[in-house]
Amino acid sequence: MSPEKLLEVARKILHPYKIHEPKMYEWWTVYIIGQRVASRFSVNERIFIAGDACHTHSPKAGQGMNASINDAHNLAWKLVQVLRGRAKISLLETYELERRKFAQDLIEFDRKYAALFSGKPSTINDDEGMSHETFSSVIEVSGGFISGIGIHYASSAITNETHQQCVPHLIIGERMPPQIFVRAADGRPYEIQDILPSDTRFKLLFFVGNLTEERVRELDALSDEMRDPSCFLQKYGYPTEGTAQSMFSIITIVSGDKDDVKFTRVPAFFRPHWSNVLLDDMDVTRSLGGGAYKRFGIDPSTMTLVIIRPDGYVGMIAPASALEDIDSYFAAFMIPRKAVLDTQLPQI
């Protein structure tokens, strides 16, 4: 390869436009695609690499910056919790576990995707080349991976699949999918993603089903259980609820018609703020929202808890009656609040 050959190729591409021979070539190069994954993403959970330092590939699917941001996004909240003394350092091990597997999948995808661009297109005289239909089908199949919506993290301390059958169509280890709900207090439609900011808090989505008299009594009993010091919410929660320093954010989702449901019937424990109660119903225009329980496969006659990790991925799903299992989930990587507070007491 030489600059003269590159110029010749450029002239063919831009014909009928012309490129004149320059007086001199100040710089030229040939970009070679390197498809590599680092053997390790961290050293003793003290030094971490992200982005291009972890994985290199072609620019064809626009994954360079996207993958890099997702690396940092995955690592950031884990670092915050460890540095605050609320999580065990073992939590940082899940960074390499999750993102290195993604990087390997990315390279495998990139090999196939880059080959599409390198192949010759099919023509009237040569139907063995790459057709438009083949190209489009690959993009359609790979759309979830390219957009990031289809990324799936394997089972780990922060991705517990024990009760996946409770909500079969809301996949543990994947991002919470977009879904519009109606805010119970004022009937305004809200995209659930707008209520799940990346603020280091775990979002506890309580799908409480139909708000019958019996269900209200069950919620009262559940709130008493969750106020007990042995409950995960008390062991790993912090008194600054609703702030960036708190550990959990409670959101209650009711199945029912907005004209019939009175959100004040929801026990105060499950509505720490008036905006935290949502309805699985359509808005006043009958064009937005509704159908979430059916879409996710949630039985409205039961109460189900969906735990959303701070990075937006579903960490665990469990029936509200399985508080011990939920406690075990958080115990696998969190440090009880009392232990943290004891270490912060002044030494005499």
Image (cartoon, rainbow, N blue to C red):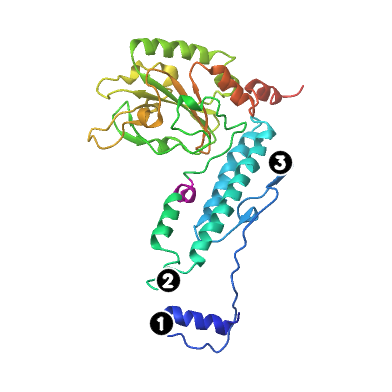
Q: Is residue 286 above or below residue 129?
A: above
Question: In this rendering, would 173 be left or right of 87?
Answer: left
Give the mark nearer the N terminus: 2 vs 3. Answer: 3
Could you tell me residue 346's position as x and y percent?
Answer: 72, 24
Could you tell me residue 276's position as x and y percent?
Answer: 40, 27
Residue that label 3 marks: 45
Main secondary-structure element of the magenta-colored stretch: helix
Real-space Cα distance between discs 2 and 3? 54 Å
Real-space Cα distance between discs 2 and 1? 23 Å
- Mark 1 or 3: the one toward you: 1
Residue pictured at 69% horizontal, 22% vertical = 342
In magenta, the rendered stretch is 142-148
Residue 145 sits inside the magenta stretch: yes
Q: Nearer the viewer, residue 12 or 271?
A: 12
Callout 3: helix, strand or loop?
loop
Residue that label 2 marks: 126
The amino acid at mark 2 is Asp
Residue 275 sits inside the magenta stretch: no
Residue that label 1 marks: 15
Callout 1: helix, strand or loop?
loop
Real-space Cα distance between discs 1 and 3? 55 Å
Q: Which residue, as the protein is rendered here, is positioned at the far right? A: 348
Q: Is residue 198 above or below residue 261?
A: below
The amino acid at mark 1 is His
Could you tell me residue 111's position as x and y percent?
Answer: 56, 58
